[in-house]
Image: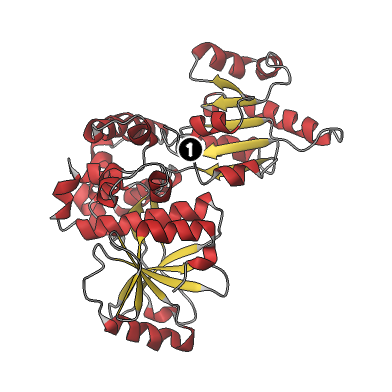
Amino acid sequence: MWFQRDIERSIRENHDPIQIFRGPRQVGKSSLILHLDEGFREVSLDDPGLRELAERDPELFLRQFGSDKLFIDEAQYAPRLFPSLKRRADLYSRDASRAPETIVRLTGSNQLVMDRRIKESLAGRASFFDMNTLSVAEIVATRSMPIQDILFTGGWPGLHAHGRTDVKKYLDDYINSYVEKDIVLGAGIHKQFEFLKFIRLLAGRVGQLLDLASLGRDAGVDSKTIKDWISILERMQLIALVQPFSTNLSSRLVKAPKVYFLDTGLACRLQGWTSADQIITSPQQGPLFENLVYAELHKTNQNHQLGWQICHWRSRDGEEIDFLVELSRTSRVFIEAKVSAHRPWDPHRLREVTRVFGSKAPPLLCCHQEGDRVFNQNVPIAHLQQLMLEAGANPKRLRA
């Protein structure tokens, strides 16, 4: 089963000589590259022989493929290859007889290493595309699936495309291979036990203000180490920090960011859940759904290259709304995540927003996982799937 990826349009409209696809393992980078253009020749540096040749003699490595368009997977394994790719891109760009076209596509599962190689050799010569797991909109456009099941399963293409039902085993294997090995080894983390404890603690705090000192005490390390580990997970695109919204009125706003996982399936498994039904009666249901709403906003923003700024809003008095999305320099909207559309809305929040923002107060949308668009206490309420499908088609629709 093939899931149409929303990012495809942005990739097809780009003609830079080199395109670099970033994102964790198993989010579908290789499958998408081959789907976009079957004319690309796939070369994986997981192959020890090809890896040795690319590192020992990168020019010979490239010459053996002639003028073929290349898709090089796991490119970070051959750092000496990058200067040669730079020369190939420069020569191509100087040839006025050729129409602009992408000739090399690169992926690498270790973003920490890839970043170093790119900064050293390909700065200004490549376009970057950040890939995530499947969004809710991408999943439901192809198959019917309850939002609650998507929350538990996450958006891993391998779980959806092949009809796999053993979500627990898939995610356990992913945690064991990618989180416990690739990230730990690639980042040179020495306190492996403490790191694994930390990432599980972090999953239990999705939607909360980030407290480095508290995480450090619970994980058994200092807050500086926690800060370093947070940065690693951000760069590996497993989590995101949502900063507080600030204007000239920022004295009323807290300074700490909130933390979210970019895939709720991974967060659910790290929390220990083994089925979607268990989550429904859990206190984590609300925070996990809020995480799902953020992940959908994040993916919609990246896939369609909308340029949104996503923040959280919280007054010093404790009033808060989950997300403030700056659609443009002059347009903002509040989004509140609520599991049920029928729970009463506290009108005091809107009064506080009006008091802080005055006549320029952003409109508010409530995002939930059931039913159709309705109005409750003058607040438009929209299904998560419906809201993001509209936003992807036309960002101006993400308004009250």
Image height of 103 relative to 119, above or below: above
Place of residue 298 in the rendered image (x, y in percent of width and height, measured from the top left):
44, 55
Image height of 43 relative to 118, above or below: above
The amino acid sitting under disc 1 is Gln
Place of residue 191 in the rendered image (x, y in percent of width and height, measured from the top left):
28, 37
What number of labels is visible?
A: 1
**Label 1: few (<14), some or many (≥20) within 10 Å?**
many
Q: Disc 1 designates what residue?
A: 111
Q: Can residue 38 be seen in this view?
A: yes
Place of residue 141 in the rendered image (x, y in percent of width and height, measured from the top left):
42, 46
Please tell me which residue lies in front, 314 or 163.
Answer: 163
Image height of 221 relative to 245, above or below: above
Place of residue 140 in the rendered image (x, y in percent of width and height, measured from the top left):
38, 47
Please tell me which residue lies in front, 257 or 17.
Answer: 17
Q: In this view, does 121 lie to the left or right of 100?
A: left
Q: Is residue 228 left or right of residue 78?
A: left
In which image quadrant can residue 353 be found? bottom left
* Residue closest to the far right: 97
